[in-house]
Amino acid sequence: MIEKKRKQVCVVELVRKTIHMIRQKGKAVSQMTLDDDYNIPETMPDAGMIVQEKGKIDIEEIKAENGRVLLRGALKFFILYMDDAEESSLHSVKGQIPFEETMNVESAGDGDSLKLDWMLEDISAVLINSRKFGIKTVATLELSVEELRDEEVPVAVEGTEGIKMKTCPMSAAALAVRKRDTSRIKDEIILPANKPNIRQIIWQDTVMQGTELRLAEGEVVIKGELVVFILYEGEEEEGKASWLEQILPFNSRVDVNGCQEGMVGSLKLELAGADLEIKPDYDGELRVINIDAVLELDIRIYQEEKLDMICDLYHPGMELIPTVSPVSYESLLVSNASKCRVSERLKTGGQEPSILQLCHGSGEVKIDDCTVTEEGILVEGAVQVQILYVTSDDSHPMLCLKGLIPFEHQIEAPGIGRDSVYYLNAWLEQLSVDMVSSGELEVKAVIQVHALVFARRNLSCITEITESPLDLDAVKVLPGFLLYVAQPSDTLWDVAKAYRTTTERICELNGLASEDLRPGQKLILVKEMGRGNL
């Protein structure tokens, strides 16, 4: 917070405190369909069946200009497939579909802060022929346009003695830190003795679970686990697939200047990517996998500023004219962390071979709708799961079961209103899959939800004080002494200001212990304008 003095056209100076804020100027939601064909490289075998597909959006450029936001990026997709040979083996390919999108936000301009969230509604790959895949997905883009701004709030006056001030308590959420940063997690996996050496990795999936983010002095502390799954071809088992899943705990710290314990934050952590590299062990055998994962952290940290703002003033012997302007700000309402537990049973299709063994399960939290209610925020969505498993059919040794587990979750936020501003992050904390039978699986998931809710406030703020000549005739009309009967809407401040006296003087003359007035209460008033001043 910065203290600043600004000279006015009279000898009275306002002492201001500057509060740094971030304000949402506008938002937009857009859906786009990405559809393209992909030709299998000549070095890869023909495809007989698609086993699994996955994808993510990679934003390469985002900029605002003249009420529009321009996006440029690509859908990066990965396909695991089985070839059409007599003894089927697994292979994978990857590619991308570039895109450009324009989103209209009237208030967007150069220099604004842009916050973009994306979600893939679904991604599907179909086999057009043995050398070509068809890729299709629907992507939802949610854009927020924000601006950094400073609000100056008067907290004191200087330059003239005898000025009486009325203050109003104010609690504002000041933006202390706004930054994006990355953290690298490096680790290694050594194959268990019962696993064959690695010839090549066919398919890999790395996800985070159980993440915890904590604000500390000058840093953000990150804890969690990386779940690493690899499907690979063994060194002496050409065409046969082996697999391994391992959980790697991690701890990381990101330096954040200005961060302090006790502040509140909206922190979003994403796994930007994970590179796996096969390395030989001490015996020269390919049994070590080096992991290099990049975590992206979007950091917003707020500090609650509590101050007493001057909302009115006067001087018994001077005519002070305040100039006021409307000011809007946000105050912290709720910082809420909660969990939602869901479970569902998924069945394989009637024509599909039975499940022999589970390999790997993965999931993503998709939020479909958020509704402000009297109790807080109602979140509706689904956990989108994919489960890779071994079948009892040698012609289809591996298949993937997909499913959606819907959920509803109520976030408690007392006092929230339709015009409140909230930031919501939801991620999968834990996912477990168990076999119920050869054709049915039970999926259990724990969803972590964090909400930061702000109430929007509006008030009139004194921005300038000017002095005008005192109307002596009007002052002379006021009686030097009178008995005043308090009205229902009266406050001691209003009475003192109107009769050119002070609240302290009224309390002294009337023996008042507090400034509270009762309707009909009688007060002795003596004009403080000295008779020598008139």
Image (cartoon, rainbow, N blue to C red):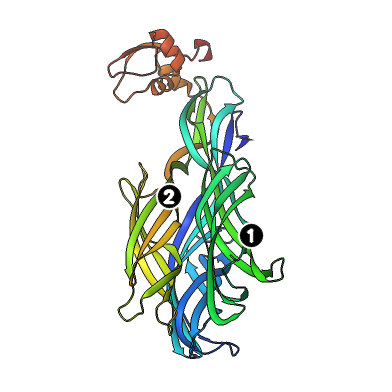
Report whether residue 302 is seen: yes
Q: Residue at x 40, y 73 (%)?
A: 356
- Residue 421's disc is 2
Residue 295: image quadrant is bottom right
Q: Indicate whether 427 appears above or below 495.
A: below
Report whether 514 appears left or right of 196.
Answer: left
Viewer-side residue, 223 vs 296: 223
Viewer-side residue, 289 vs 81: 289
Query: Where residue 118 sits: x, y (%)?
Result: 48, 65
Q: CA distance from mark 1 to mark 2?
A: 39 Å
- Residue 72's disc is none
Viewer-side residue, 118 vs 8: 118
Query: Where residue 413 sits: x, y (%)?
Result: 37, 44
- Residue 187's disc is 1
Report whether residue 121 is seen: no
Query: Where residue 448 sits: x, y (%)?
Result: 43, 52
Query: Where residue 305 sits: x, y (%)?
Result: 52, 36
Q: Are marks 1 and 2 in contact (CB under 8 Å)?
A: no
Report whether 192 appears left or right of 432.
Answer: right
Residue 110: image quadrant is bottom right
Q: Quadrant of the N terminus?
A: top right
